[in-house]
Amino acid sequence: MSRLKKIIKNPRVIIVLFFILLSIYLISPQFSEGVAIRGVIKDSAAAEARPEPMLPPPSTAKPTNREVIKLVNGQPINTVEDYYEATSNFSVNETVTIKTNKQTYYLTTKPLILVKTLSETETNEVTKAVFNQELNTTENVTINETVNKTVEEIKGVQDIGLSVYPKPSNNIQQGLDLQGGTRVLLKPETKINPEDVDIILENIKQRLDVYGVNDVTVRTTKDFFGNTFISVEIAGVNEEEIKNLLTEQGKFEAKVGQETIFEGGNKDVLYVCRTASCSTVDHDACVPNGDGQIFCRFRFSITLSQRAAEAQAAATANLGVVDAGINSAEGYLTENLSLYLDDELVDQLRIGAGLKGNAVTNIQISGSGIGSDKDSARTDALNNMKRLQTILITGSLPVKLDIVKTDTISPALGSSFIKNAILAGLMAVLVVILVVTIRYREWKIAAPMALTMLSEVIILLGFASMIGWKIDMVAIAAIIIAIGSGVDDQIVITDETLAQGAKKKENYDWKQKLKKAFFIIMASYFTLVVAMIPLWFAGAGLLKGFALTTIAGVTIGVLITRPAFAVILETLVE
């Protein structure tokens, strides 16, 4: 018992225990069943729920903080199968009650309408004048006319619009290998500058956001030769769907009423200001809006082509003018400028009365942001301005993007990967413990090694949960390598500690032997880190997870767990 107290009171052991407890808190293991919301389809019943729309989880949300469905019309939901069974027999215009861990929603189901175009021959005869070349005369003849008719037919009930998956049992974020989804690697046809990279990333994010795709990771990577790639990872979307989203979409239109004024891209929008000289939030124009909130305006300028300017003048020439209120120096036209991305309405802007009937190429676009105080209102206005700028640039990518590689993993296969990886890891640990026990024939050596390996895995997973790093098959391989490196270091510590075990105790120098062991460990550590740095950039960044996880694992071992192992070993065998 005295040795155990000595071990527990040692500062190095206390540090390890602290990091273990912190990691368990960050991982937040949970054992209850449930169904979490992954996404909400646009214009669905869920997106129009009352008293407020159901929203997809933000990308920064921890897995255990996802909204969880508890009841559907009073029926408990514990599994995904329970959810689909409860939502499979709705009727049109039925009110559905969904209770989650955060809110109770009321949805109204929508009919599923099939639109058919039928070509039919009208029974009514149409009289037409036909010229007879032989008689050189014009005769009136009657013919039957074929017309196209559009017929709407109700085929059932639309899905309520929720994408669900089993409730996460911890905060360890799983990569596509483990949860299923698609990864697409895109390469620009020509070299691009950093500003163009930002435009492309915002374009892709905006496009995917419009289509209601969630659990998205969009990032840039580079290879050994400095080539830039864009990696897009989406959970729960198959290969063809994401290909269509990334390569076939991108039409931007601005309309007044039903008339298209200009389209996105260099054809009509020649320039969108994104610099401080012509793009700003009016910090001095923040005023209360009457509802206890602060209202801040932003403005930026764009340059249209002459064709677009003339189209704008023609579309607004006959519009009326309405007063915008006491806070505006001039009125606005009766029609708004509606912004569409791939035929989806994403924003509406008021048109100043000064633009009525005028073919102006340089125009100023303004909008607003709202917050509880000036700082939050300015932040909201800035975010809204950047979003509008991105919308106007959407469809005008600086370069064409080519799909270099696609990977698709089914959720069922991902679940199988998890089970096999855990089984392989446990088998590896058991084999190592068995070999160490046979080699040293001492539980005092085998037990601390096993605890040290377990500690390193827990702390590494806690680190991944804290920074939001996704664990995939590559990362699991790196964890196994880090554990193997740790076992190797522990054997070095053990051998150096016991090297003079046969000699007299008074001639045994513990500190000197441990210094020699840690010199070997640090040399091995720096060699491994240097070897991982090239993998950070290899394969257009696809091996970055392997390099990061390996470096993090061996660093945790060298700085935290292995010094504690040396103390425990010294105390047990001295």
Image (cartoon, rainbow, N blue to C red):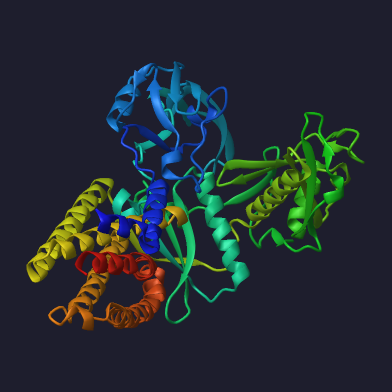
Q: Of 500 and 219, which appears nearest the observer? A: 500
The residue sitting at 41% across, 75% down in the picture is 537
Where residue 431 sits, quadrant-wise, is bottom left
- Seen at 40% across and 59% down, the residue is 15
Instruction: Please give left or right for residue 228 compared with residue 184 in the image.
Output: right
Is residue 155 something one can see in this rendering? no
Could you tell me residue 427's position as x and y percent? 14, 58
x, y percent for residue 508: 23, 81
Q: Is residue 538 above or below residue 246?
A: below
| Residue at the limit of the structure toward the front, as seen here | 506
Question: Which image quadrant is residue 37 in?
Answer: top left
Total marks placed: 0
Q: Is residue 440 visible?
A: yes
Q: Residue at x 79, y 56 (%)?
A: 280
Q: Quadrant of the C terminus?
A: bottom left
Q: Is residue 395 above or below residue 138?
A: below
Rendering coords of residue 42 (x, y %): 51, 36
Tell me if residue 299 comes above or below residue 338 in the rendering.
below
- Position of 500 with respect to 359 (left or right) is left
In the image, residue 507 lies at what x, y percent? 22, 83
Q: Give the residue displayed 85% in from the left and 47% down from the top.
A: 355
Asked whether 225 or 292 is in front, the reply is 292
